[in-house]
Amino acid sequence: MAELCSLAEAVGELVHDGDSVALEGFTHLIPFAAGHELLRQGRCELELIRMTPDILYDQMIGVGAARKLTFSYAGNPGVGSLHRLRDAVEHGWPRPIGLEEHSHAGMANRYAAGAAHLPFAVMRGYAGTDLASHTNVKPIACPFTGEQLMAVPALRPDVAIVHAQEADREGNVQLWGIPGVQKEAVLAAARSLVTVERVVERLEPRPGGVVIPGWVIDRVAEAPGGSRPSYSLGITDRDNDFYRFWDKLSRDRDEFTAWMEEHVLGNGVASGGGPECRNP
Amino acid sequence: MAELCSLAEAVGELVHDGDSVALEGFTHLIPFAAGHELLRQGRCELELIRMTPDILYDQMIGVGAARKLTFSYAGNPGVGSLHRLRDAVEHGWPRPIGLEEHSHAGMANRYAAGAAHLPFAVMRGYAGTDLASHTNVKPIACPFTGEQLMAVPALRPDVAIVHAQEADREGNVQLWGIPGVQKEAVLAAARSLVTVERVVERLEPRPGGVVIPGWVIDRVAEAPGGSRPSYSLGITDRDNDFYRFWDKLSRDRDEFTAWMEEHVLGNGVASGGGPECRNP
Amino acid sequence: MSGSDPTTTGAAAGGAGIPAGTTGTDASPAPASAGELQTIVAARRLREAQSVFIGVGRPSTAALLARIVHNPRLVLVYESGTIGAKPYHVPLSIGDGELAETADAIVSVPEMFNYWIGTGRIQVAFLGAAQIDPHANLNSTVIGDYEHPRTRLPGAGGAPEIATGCREVVVIAPHSVRTFVKRLDFVTTTGDRTTHVITDLGVLEPDPDTRELVITQIHPGVTPEQVQEATGWELKMADELRVTDPPTEAELEALRELVAR
Amino acid sequence: MSGSDPTTTGAAAGGAGIPAGTTGTDASPAPASAGELQTIVAARRLREAQSVFIGVGRPSTAALLARIVHNPRLVLVYESGTIGAKPYHVPLSIGDGELAETADAIVSVPEMFNYWIGTGRIQVAFLGAAQIDPHANLNSTVIGDYEHPRTRLPGAGGAPEIATGCREVVVIAPHSVRTFVKRLDFVTTTGDRTTHVITDLGVLEPDPDTRELVITQIHPGVTPEQVQEATGWELKMADELRVTDPPTEAELEALRELVAR
């Protein structure tokens, strides 16, 4: 049964150094506030998992919190590269980082297998690519037709963290808009945290609403604006300017470090929601 | 792109003698009107596919339209047995019928594999049961962990027929309430027909709404009341009395035959919706 | 529907049956029937449960009763995809509209089996069957030979994976030699996770070592001989055979009010 | 995002570039840039299409333009799960709110890849890449050695399965020796289903027998020599090299109006 608590408590109780952590969100509903709290608490040696690592993971990798990144597309959506990730991969700054990469279809199926507590999933994919020999997939034959397909191993993160629009006081969560793989991430993980824009008395059923019952979630924490500069459909808007701003700022190690110190790491100011996190 | 037409045209164009046909619906939204139209047009030698064959399939089997039934639970929900099915299986009346049976999890995964156009799905199931040796499943080992699991072959019906609350004039369909495996059935089938309670100018997004775009459907036909005595949430109610009535009526071959002649087969009266189909 | 005993689904809460157990006061209503007592005992098993997977018939009635009397936060899950349903009426089918209208979440059937049932998220499953053997294996497929059955039963439904996916299984079955058989005609569902078999005569539990069912509890007014007579094999008795607590007034009243809705 | 070329995603519709092609009348606006022409040519490929899978950047702009000018019923599908999106603005990301708000249906990412992309339901896919080879294989993973890359690119995203799942693939890429290379540093995506490669200089199509890309069409004002110079291998020319129809006024105006929104 989900316990409602503060973001700081939730992160402190659920995430340990060295954990594999999936902060999911497919452009929409990215849990920035939770990621920043994780950094403020000094979590390190993390395996970061996400289909589409973007600015949040660029920040986490840039301060050296990650030992490994498991992903399928690491870019600044619609803008370009993740410069901190590139610096880590190309030059080992501030530390080298291990990569495990898949295609989106592979990652999505890995999460789905994880949510089903199955050890693997079967798909048509990776055929003819160099990906197959650089990642953890194995050919598998259909026992009925003999067709050669690909098996991908289930993803079972230690912790999943996602953001949603609302929760009720029982910890039942509702999100709407682009649902991504958030439900799968929560169901696949050993522990889970959902940050929400607001806690309401009662979840009003909505078109496109995806409800995750509180009894499969460990902690729910209120974090208004907690997905900014990403967005929570119907509540906050995507700050496209910040994504463009990040492309410039993040090219320089010193500027990046100073910005993170001032806006994320310093004096415990909640980020993601406040003006601190916006394009100055 | 879905073509809107009459139920009679749709059935006439899409369903041929000998086809495998999935008239899906999980207690909710069972396409009675379409099934009755199929009988009125004299389709025969069908392989009927459905997770939960109930009264509709009892009727179709009772008049001898089916050569085979593929299913996972064949009962009158909450009431008891399907007497016409039992008569066919136990005494070959009015003709013998072949059975291919699975568990619900097996059938659901077979549909999901079909919808993904994969040849099979992997699951944990059938272990230790006699089902495994009486149906078409095969053991499969996880290539990563070695765990023994079960492979089930994809379901790819010739035709899927489902019922929904609404369609717009482009043939986009929306259903809500218990969604069952209807989307999977449509996406798994070579051809598809959706009958709807009503055609509307514009689909209004609804809580729990499942939208199937018109461009993956072949025909949409208006059939108000077309799921009765099952129901279409928000529009018609389940006629529980009829399910209990059927338990009595269907025990007797002659009474069944007379009832079918009068209420379903005779003079082209649309069934399912009209008073003819109700407990007299 | 697979989660319920096809032989009991017709009667929502037991209806007729031999009286068994009373509340023992003058002002009390008619004594509980054996079926009512069975439902009440099943409901008690859900006192501490977080979630229960149920079919229609007695399992559904018992779970609704548990929500009323013991455990208002109990999460009801039906294979139709309704999670956290809170029906006011005992549903006739597992897909009744009231289940959809009162659920916390509704999911597709593939999601129900893959993400919810198969993963051990649901704590207790109530299952029924036409036959049960000494190791709590169940048959809901055929009586007689598979190819030429004497009685064709509805089939597996969700039971095989419910029984291996949920954390513990409680079987609810009528106690008779027709149901309690030494050897099943067909193994539809395995009994490995079964913790209790609740009948209209008593409660059986598997021996921790041999996994063979042992009668551990009998309902008031039932004799061990009656139980043995209704069982198709030589039934082991627990060293300390408990007697079921009689239904409380609250339980019986709530049950009757629920069924009358 | 995987469906777009990382090198073009920054510029929504081409922006600056060498002028190429004009509408040829006095009242006409400024001549089309090479980027604009590339977008217009890509949009023309969707005249008859029922559905198109797109990433952001030029592919998205081209698909929106096609809906305005050629094919109002064209179904846009984004890997974020939005099916039938009808955005008014060119989206910056494949997950912009406007896509969700205007979609016919929104599905989860696993469903998008398993039920929609992997099945051939979507007719055309627009893909970009950092490198393309003579057989239209694409690299969007690394420049240089995989373990010690000179440039780490964003990675595969949806491309590998989009390229094998959709019925035909159209690649949209800038024409330069940096992009058109004889040998890829990494094969991210195979070119088996590619029917057209649309660049800012012309259009390439695979030879039906050898599957090697052949330049079949050049944009107005472009010479075959220019194309060869911008290609990192000895490029085969079609026997009849067509010249791209210049942008019509309607196309150019609609494109500029779209980008200015």
Image (spheres, coloured by chain):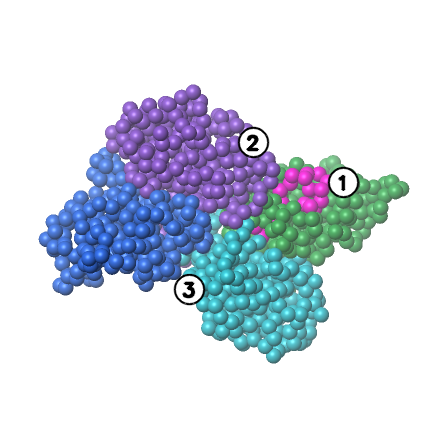
Chain colours: A cyan, B purple, C blue, D green
Picture residue at 56% right of the left edge, 31% below the top: B4
| Residue reaching furthest to the bottom | A267
The local secondary structure at tag 2 comes to strand
* Relative horizontal placement of residue A124, taking residue C36 as reference (left or right): right
Chain for numbered disc 1: D
Picture residue at 60% right of the left edge, 57% below the top: A233
From which residue to which does the magenta span run? D62-81
Q: Is residue A247 visible?
A: no
Q: Quadrant of the N terminus of chain B?
A: top right
How many numbered circles does the render carry?
Answer: 3
Q: Which mark is residue D244?
A: 1
Q: Residues within 10 Å of mark 3 (few under 14, many from 20)?
A: some
| Residue nearest the observer in this picture, A144 or C228 | C228
Picture residue at 59% right of the left edge, 49% below the top: D82
Q: Are marks 2 and 1 on the same chain?
A: no
The residue under label 3 is A1
| Residue nearest the observer in this picture, A246 or B201 | B201
Q: CA distance from mark 3 to mark 2?
A: 47 Å
Of discs 1 and 3, which sits in the foreground?
A: 3
Q: Residues within 10 Å of mark 2 (few under 14, many from 20)?
A: many
The local secondary structure at tag 3 comes to loop
| Residue nearest the observer in this picture, C261 or A115 | C261
Of discs 3 and 2, which sits in the foreground?
A: 3
Rendering coords of residue C239 (x, y %): 13, 63
Residue type at numbered disc 3: Met
Residue type at numbered disc 2: Leu
Q: CA distance from mark 1 to mark 3?
A: 63 Å
Rendering coords of residue B211 (x, y %): 53, 44
D70 in the magenta segment: yes
The residue under label 2 is B4
Residue type at numbered disc 1: Thr
